[in-house]
Amino acid sequence: MSWETVIGLEIHAQLATRSKIFSGAATAYGAEPNTQACLVDLGYPGVLPVLNAEAVRMAVKFGLAIGASIAPRSVFARKNYFYPDLPKGYQISQYELPIVHDGRLDIELEDGSTSSVHIIRAHLEEDAGKSLHENFTGLTAIDLNRAGTPLIEIVSAPDMRSAKEAVAYMKKIHQLVRYLGICDGNMQEGSFRCDANVSVRRAGSDQLGTRTETKNLNSFRFLERAILHEVERQIEVLESGGKVVQETRLYDPDRDETRSMRSKEEANDYRYFPDPDLLPVVIDAGFIDAVRAGMPELPDARRERFVAAYGLPAADAALLAASIELADWFEAVLAAAPGSARLAANWINGELMAALNRDGLGIEASRVSPEQLAGLLRRVMDDTISGKLAKQVFELLWSEGGDADTIIDRQGLRQITDSSAIEAVVDQVLAANPGQVAEFRAGKTKVMGFLVGQIMKASAGKANPAQVNELLKRKLQG
Amino acid sequence: MSRPGITQLARALRARETSSRELVAGALARIEAQDRVLNSFISVAAGQALAAADRADQQLARGEGGPLTGIPFAHKDIFCTAGLRTTCASKMLADFIPPYDATVVSRLAAAGIVVLGKTNMDEFAMGSSNETSFFGPVRNPWDLQRSPGGSSGGSAAAVAAGLVPAATGTDTGGSIRQPAALTGITGLKPTYGRVSRYGMVAFASSLDQAGILTLSAEDAALLLSAMAGFDPRDSTSADLPVPDYMAQLGEAVAGRRIGLPKEFFDAGLDPASASAVREALRVYEQLGAKLVEISLPSLALSVPTYYIVAPAECSSNLSRFDGVRFGYRHEGAQTLEELYKKSRGEGFGAEVKRRILTGTYVLSAGYYDAYYLKAQKARQLIARDFRRCFAEVDIIAGPTAPTPAFRLGEKVDDPVQMYLNDIYTIAVNLAGLPGISIPCGYSTGLPVGLQLVGPHFGEGRLLNFAHLYQRETDWHTQLPPAVAGPGA
């Protein structure tokens, strides 16, 4: 009998506010340890939290983007536990009344199928600091720069059935928060990470199996690996007659395995209760309307518009809409080279991506600007240059900069469209290859390709291929 | 020996009959002479105080400054004072020097007040007798064998003994009003949210409120005007204008209705205290006010409700004292858990531990609904009782405490008896209302307090009622033996 995997994710996205969720300290990453922690973040006696309104706006933005309900009244609660990087001995979070609940996200899988994931809730909370064990032999150092950084925790229902589906969902949320501008999505810096709740059950069963929670997965690959390992482990346990223990596990990317962190029995009793230092967050329709008015076009809408307005194939549109930066880049090319949509899509998804990947760059660091690419595409569209030679120009734009027109002229790459000039080359090639000409006339029309190649070669690729074909046909048949 | 209040001192300073330096030096000398016995101060900052007094004198000489400029003052040792240690009367914070001032401290400093030091209290404000202090109990100037009440016992004793004319206190369940009653002075607990809690070390956040212990309602009005108002650093502070409390003093109360909750005059009330309170109410009748019997049927729930809500919040608020960043740390711990356990085990006193344990228990999975949630519901009922009453009456009056000052050690081993001392004050905190205690007579030679309770943000009305009573009576000017001296 086969097994079915059941997955739910808790995604933690760091909100891109300038200051912390309950204090005025900066949130910038990478500062010297403990230089971005004020008395509130340090949990000094007597200090009090004051809610950052920007964090609330961002959470509402997210809620609207997933078609969720925005709670008219949500409440901050204290989650109590002791840990050295948790200065107050409690984390301020939301428990019974989260700010966002009951949303939905549609995801597309690699095989082209789609599924819909229910998002149970998304709540605001503060991040803890960091415990540093490296470089301090026998000691633990604490960096509280991150303490108090705003997070939104996005909790899905156990709606996913494979590691691939979970990855697709996490990618979709990642794409969404970056489109919304509420999270920088930087997974290496921990701005976007998730916990995976995984269980397995007999195919066809409607009962959920016992789940484990694997913590702190900060890459799509780790998420996939961790789930695959956990599924394999659980099936092995069950098939050998054992029971899955409800526990918290940790994925070790170095060893590529998950291991137990603590069992349910060892789990903390967090003693949640409403934080008496903070008033309930009251959100009225006016606030929601103002946030809605400032919403950007969302990824799905943009992708669909790329298909509808520019006639792009669905797959190209999906690639271009994958990130807001790329989509903006694409549309910047179109602005400078109107009517180039399909061509631009091919160039961006082809040459540009290849160059970026080769140099390990993101789109924001591309060495060719949208305006430079548009300049090149304009010359392709008006037949100044062939598609093949355009690639050479692109490489020069990439390596040396400048603009396409200058490079085309300097390199003498302008396409030959003067038919008498082309005819001269054709005649010259026919004269040099009497054998092939005879073959053609004897019915072996395949040699046509060879002759075209020779002509293009002789013109250094500059002859207009359509004209070459036409002339050649006329001469051979005539 | 006299015991002038702020209003008199301010007048003398303006008239150049005295200087702030003279007042502060005098107060320091009295502390030096008497406080070895009273133990009302934990820290005295003589140099800092004299320097501040000199600055105040310069201001006064230029004709600048306000009614509080140059007045000697003390803060309960729960308010953070930059550079001056703030202990909360706990071993945990015995060496803690805050890097910042509480809003109350900075507002009063801006008004020119001169801080002489920090007063003793029950540890983390948990107690009703000042006996839980790591720095030892405070003695009541009316009888040195007795408690001044708590938790603001140091402030109460210092003001009653004339060491300083006024001091701050905090009131979570009666911690300003009860010690004011037991030491024969005036103690005002404002509406929850009226005064910022920023910089006040938290005990129970939804109940804690800063207030003052003074020699008269007039002095309290003056101080409240300087302390009150919205603070952007405290989300629970009320964003409401602060009225001119002084301007309301002296308004006629003829026709006003005073509600007397029958539950306040129950069998648990000391008969002599009861008659002192009833006698006091006749003064209001003579001023034309009407006495109306009312009922607060849920009042009996207030002590149990309080001893769930306050410990629950305190168990969380005190988690930050873990030996990691500040405060007492057990040296030589081998593991993190040992560091926590020993630092907290050695740093906190018995009553604080009792409340942390109680609070942890009532918030635990499986008990939360039965205790914490139910207590929140009871709290709503208590608040509703008061709302109903204030639809009928302008002010509520009754005793502040069931008995006058008790002997040191008398209740220390019986927490429930100790907790019952706050039976008339606790409900006021649960409802977030303002309350004031003023002296109104004696029981067995010890002061008795009259408690007045107002509607939310009704401090002006409360202070006016208290002021009118003090205009008609002189209980508030009567000196304890420790001040009056032998044979007085």
Image: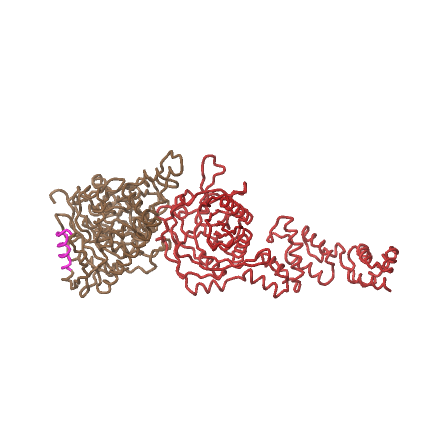
Chain colours: A red, B brown
Residue at image x 17%, y 62%? B293
Q: Is residue B314 left or right of residue A119?
A: left
Between residue A359 and residue B313, name the one nearer to us: B313
* Horizontal and vertical percent position of residue B301: 24, 54
Quarter of the figure that contains the C terminus of chain A: bottom right
Q: Main secondary structure of the magenta part?
A: helix
* Horizontal and vertical percent position of residue B237: 34, 56
Q: Is residue B450 left or right of residue A208?
A: left
* Horizontal and vertical percent position of residue B146: 18, 43
Magenta residue check for B277: yes
Magenta residue check for B349: no
* Span shown in magenta: B269-283
Between residue A470 and residue B43, name the one nearer to us: A470
Q: How many marks?
A: 0
Furthest residue toward top: B332
Image: B274 above or below A141: below
